[in-house]
Each structure stands twice: as structure tokens, then as C-alpha cells.
Image (spheres, helix red, strand yellow):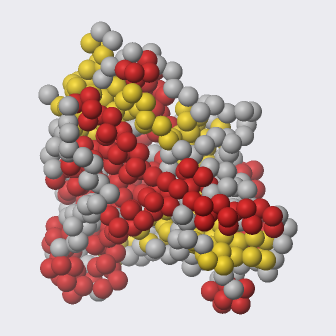
């Protein structure tokens, strides 16, 4: 029997799984969709320096400052150390800027004032109304790579990962949780998984899991809308130097720039709708810092749901701490065999995992200490595979593949070396046929969404309008899916892409996106699919790994 089951395939759940595996605990992770299909992939991609929380939440700021350095060290494959700025505009309170600088130094966050002439040279698109600027060690982090790296490391140590398994109930042995009931999303079959301990790391859905044991958790689902701009509008993360609010941060990542975010409490953690008024507000506020944000091309708008721990007053969720809590339900509620971790941020995922695993270790009688802050998540990519890819596709593409597949690069290189493997399927993100085929074979029966999360397929300018059908046909040609499955495979991918596109666009941009969507549907005679049914939650098979 398993010693522990972790519920939730986001950053915290994956971090817990790796931590437990390093301590020698026999553990499994269950996730209702694909890995990283929830909050850990639906955020602005910021590895916090802590500066955002320095004044209001100094404890969270100190945690971020420490974990920022740790994550850079243990997960270089997922981090772009681009640096960050906090800028005060003419209309912003100069007194707040003074308090902020003092609070950063108190929290141990390095702060360097930036000369205005230097700022204009380095970030020429910033507004002329900038009056002060400070450099901080912000960075961008890829949530997909971070989670998949943690999972790969845990699996190498014997952990199990079961995706597309929805928890439908908890197995109870009197007042003790003894495992989970699962529904296999691919087959509809019911499954049971027993363990000595269940760790609830379900994020915004943590309250639903706790309720299965008749426990009430104060989890507030806080929806945030973000915009994705074509190209990198800044070279560094740019934060507005004022009390945190809507539309006050730009994060360059990959080939795009993200602008975020709003904060709206919602009753349902599955509510990732994008209200047009929030898109308009983000554009207006973003343009105060970066005037081009009013007219630059937006690729898509999307939303994620933050799992905040606490109660809210009215509609203002920004007053709720961004800290986290680990709850031992035996001590708190008299229900044994269940631990929950709620709140926090992706930046502090490793610390959250450590604290949850510490509690789990006590229950399981495990004395091995946490090692996740010292040991790299994965070893460096295989140098022979890197050199082989450099020879096949050039250094830039080889390094991108090494970052995306650090644990399986030899297999990817072998697939790229096959006839046709160097062909570019996705021009925007430079994804080759070999990378797609190699990734698909590792997953078994993937959706295009599964491949997108691992290769960035369809995340560039065309948003899958052209590369989506190429990828679907490639999977059929390679015998990974049946030819008759191609229309549905592509329809679900397009529905998910279209949902984000139509939420953020208008005018000529919307007409271009409609053309892409219509072309793909017409070429394969696809039946329309409602955009409200994204492929992430309706997938027939997915990457089931057990």
C-alpha cells in the first residue's frame, strides 16, 4: 500500500511529491486533468523578488526573497533571470516609494536605484511620466517546466503519477481518511487508491476535497485576468511602484509579454471566464506605465484562480494575505490521515512542499530531512544529446529543447534525427516534428493541449490556427492517433485556443483570428465545438501515466 497520496498536479503538489520521494516515502500524485492545467499555468509567470509584498505582507516578502534564490539554483531550466523594475509614475505617491524601499531592505530584498538616463536606454517604451525606478531580482519562471521537472525527478525515485483522474470521494476508516476514490476521465471507470496519508494540495479546489471529509476550509477563489502581448515589450519585469492593484505588472517571457492582473472573487474555482470590462481596464492601466499597451497586438486574454486562505471583506481580495498554511486535520478537526496546504504563490511552492512534507513525515514515522533546497531538481541535460541537436537544428533550437525536456532529451534528439524530424511544425515557437512526435510517444495518447504544455505548440502569433492542424495530421501519420480522431482532436484544441483569443481581441485582430479558426475547421470539416468546453477538461484520453 502507498504511504501517501498527493492530490493536485500543480507546483505545490509536484513539489510535495518530489520532497516525499527524496525522503524515501512511497507516494503517488493524482490530478483531475493534465499536469499544470490549473493555477500554476494560469498566472503571470513571475518569480517574485518579494518586492510586491514588502509593505503590506513582509512575511511573504521574506519568503519570496529566499525562495527566489533557491528556485534559480535548483531549477535553472525553468527560470529566465531577466531582472525586474519597480517604477513610480508622476501621479503615484512618493511617500509610498520611500516606505517601499525601507520595507524591501528590511525583508532582505536587494534594491538598486536606477538612473533615469540608464532607464530610458534600457526600457525605451516606458512612459515619460516615470519619476523613480528601482531594480530588484525578479525573474520569469515557466510553470510547466517547473512542475514537469519536479514530477520527472519524483518518478525517477519511484513515485507514481496518475493524470486525468478526478477525485470523487475520500475513503474513510471511521474518522480517518484511508485513501481516495477516483474516476478515470479517459474511461469513466471508478478506481480506489489506498494510503496511510492523503495530502490535499488541490489549490483553488482544496475546499472541495476537504468537504469530502466534512471539513470546512476557508479557501477564497480569486480570479485574475491577464493579457498576452505579441513580442517582448520590455526586457525586464516592470512593476508599478504603488500599493498592489490591477494592471500593474508586465512580465516578458519567451516570445511574449504578459500584463496582469485583476482580482475578483468567484464562487466556483472552475470560473476562468474573461469579462470584457476587465480586459479594457487592464489595457487602460497598463498603458499608464507602457503607452504601447493601448495599441500593441494582443494574442489572447486568459484567467486563473488564486487559492487564497482566509475570509474576504466584501469584494476586496487584495487584503487577504498571499501567505500559506499547512493544516493537520487530525489536530484541527479530529480527522486523521489528511493534511491540507492552502494559499501561497508559485514562487514559494518549494517551501510550501517542505512544510507539508514535514507534517506528513511525522505521521508516517519518517525521519529523513528535507533536501529540496540543496539538490538540483534535475541533472544538467545530457551533453551528447545537446550536441546532437545543435548539429541537427542549430544551437538556439537545441537549447530551447533542452530547457523543455531536460529529463528526456536523448529520446527527443533521437526523434528529431528521424526522417522529417527537423521539419518545423510551429513557426512561432520553432517546434519541430521530431520534438512533437518524441513527446507524444512518451505520453501515450496525448491531446494537442498536452503537447502545447510541453512544447509551446500553438502559443505564438497564430495561436494554433496553422500549426494545430499540422500537428494533428502529424500524429495520425505517425500512428499515434487514428485518422478518424483527427477532427475531434483539432476541434478541442481550437476551442481552447479560441476561448482565449476571443476574450482579448477586437477589430482587425479578431478578424484575423476568426480566419485562422475558420481555415482549420474548413480544411478538416470539423463540427463546431463550444469554446466553453476547453480540451483541458473534456479530454478523452490524455497523458495518463501510471
The outermost residue toward the front is 106
Instruction: State the residue at coordinates (57%, 46%).
Output: 322
Query: Can see residue 476?
Result: no
Q: Is residue 16 above or below residue 376?
A: above
The outermost residue toward the right is 91
Query: Can see residue 178?
Result: yes
The outermost residue toward the top is 174
Residue 431's x, y, as percent? 35, 72
Q: How many marks?
A: 0
Return the residue nearer the eye: 74 or 260. Answer: 74
Residue 75 lies left or right of residue 308; in this view the side is left
Residue 539's x, y, as percent? 36, 42
Residue 6 lies left or right of residue 226; in this view the side is left
Instruction: State the residue at coordinates (47%, 26%).
Output: 208
Residue 31's x, y, as percent? 34, 39
Instruction: State the residue at coordinates (66%, 82%).
Output: 114
Residue 334's x, y, as percent? 39, 15
Amino acid at each position: 500500500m502507498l504511504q501517501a497520496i498527493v492530490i493536485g498536479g500543480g507546483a505545490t503538489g509536484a513539489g510535495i511529491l518530489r520532497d516525499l520521494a527524496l525522503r524515501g516515502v512511497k507516494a503517488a500524485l493524482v490530478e483531475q486533468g493534465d499536469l499544470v492545467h490549473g493555477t500554476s499555468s494560469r498566472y503571470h509567470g513571475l518569480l517574485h523578488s518579494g518586492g510586491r509584498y514588502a509593505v503590506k505582507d513582509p512575511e511573504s516578502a521574506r519568503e519570496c526573497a529566499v525562495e527566489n534564490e533557491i528556485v534559480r539554483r535548483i531549477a535553472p531550466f525553468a527560470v529566465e533571470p531577466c531582472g525586474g523594475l519597480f517604477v513610480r509614475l508622476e501621479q503615484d505617491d512618493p511617500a509610498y516609494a520611500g516606505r517601499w524601499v525601507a520595507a524591501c531592505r528590511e525583508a532582505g530584498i536587494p534594491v538598486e536605484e536606477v538612473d533615469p538616463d540608464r532607464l530610458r536606454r534600457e526600457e525605451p517604451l516606458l512612459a515619460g511620466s516615470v519619476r523613480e525606478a528601482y531594480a530588484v531580482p525578479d525573474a520569469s519562471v515557466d510553470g510547466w517546466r517547473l512542475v514537469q521537472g519536479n514530477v520527472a525527478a519524483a518518478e525517477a525515485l519511484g513515485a507514481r503519477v496518475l493524470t486525468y483522474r478526478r477525485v470523487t470521494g475520500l475513503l474513510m476508516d471511521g474518522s480517518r481518511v484511508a485513501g481516495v476514490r477516483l474516476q478515470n476521465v479517459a474511461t469513466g471507470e471508478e478506481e480506489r487508491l489506498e494510503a496511510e496519508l492523503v495530502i490535499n494540495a488541490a489549490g483553488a479546489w482544496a475546499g472541495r476535497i476537504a468537504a469530502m471529509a466534512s471539513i470546512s476550509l476557508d479557501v477564497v477563489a480569486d480570479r485574475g485576468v491577464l493579457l498576452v502581448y505579441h513580442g517582448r515589450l520590455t526586457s525586464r519585469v516592470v512593476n508599478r511602484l504603488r500599493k498592489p492593484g490591477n494592471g500593474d505588472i508586465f512580465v516578458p517571457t519567451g516570445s511574449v509579454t504578459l500584463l496582469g492582473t485583476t482580482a475578483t472573487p468567484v464562487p466556483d474555482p472552475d470560473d476562468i471566464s474573461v469579462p470584457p470590462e476587465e480586459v479594457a481596464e487592464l489595457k487602460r492601466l497598463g498603458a499608464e506605465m507602457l503607452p504601447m499597451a493601448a495599441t500593441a497586438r494582443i494574442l489572447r486574454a486568459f484567467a486563473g484562480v488564486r487559492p487564497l486562505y482566509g475570509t474576504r471583506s466584501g469584494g476586496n481580495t487584495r487584503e487577504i494575505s498571499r501567505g500559506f498554511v499547512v493544516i493537520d486535520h487530525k489536530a484541527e478537526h479530529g480527522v486523521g490521515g489528511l493534511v491540507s496546504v492552502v494559499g501561497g504563490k508559485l514562487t514559494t511552492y518549494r517551501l510550501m512542499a517542505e512544510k507539508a512534507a514535514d507534517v506528513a513525515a511525522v505521521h508516517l514515522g519518517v525521519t529523513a530531512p528535507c533536501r529540496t533546497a540543496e539538490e538540483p531538481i534535475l541533472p544538467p541535460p545530457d551533453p551528447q544529446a545537446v550536441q546532437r541537436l545543435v548539429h541537427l537544428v542549430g544551437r538556439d533550437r537545441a537549447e530551447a529543447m533542452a530547457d523543455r525536456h531536460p529529463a528526456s532529451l536523448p529520446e527527443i534528439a533521437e526523434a528529431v534525427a528521424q526522417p522529417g524530424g527537423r521539419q518545423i511544425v510551429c513557426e512561432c515557437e520553432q517546434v519541430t516534428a521530431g520534438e512533437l512526435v518524441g513527446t507524444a510517444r512518451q505520453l501515450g495518447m496525448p491531446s494537442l493541449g498536452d503537447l502545447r504544455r510541453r512544447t509551446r505548440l500553438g502559443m505564438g502569433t497564430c495561436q494554433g490556427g496553422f500549426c494545430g492542424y499540422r500537428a494533428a495530421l502529424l500524429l495520425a501519420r505517425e500512428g499515434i492517433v487514428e485518422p478518424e480522431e483527427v477532427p475531434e482532436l483539432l476541434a478541442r484544441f481550437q476551442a481552447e485556443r479560441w476561448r482565449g483569443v476571443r476574450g482579448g481581441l477586437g477589430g482587425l485582430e479578431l478578424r484575423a483570428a476568426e480566419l485562422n479558426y475558420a481555415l482549420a475547421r474548413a480544411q478538416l470539416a470539423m463540427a463546431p465545438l463550444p469554446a466553453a468546453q476547453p480540451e483541458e477538461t473534456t479530454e478523452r484520453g490524455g497523458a495518463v501515466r501510471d
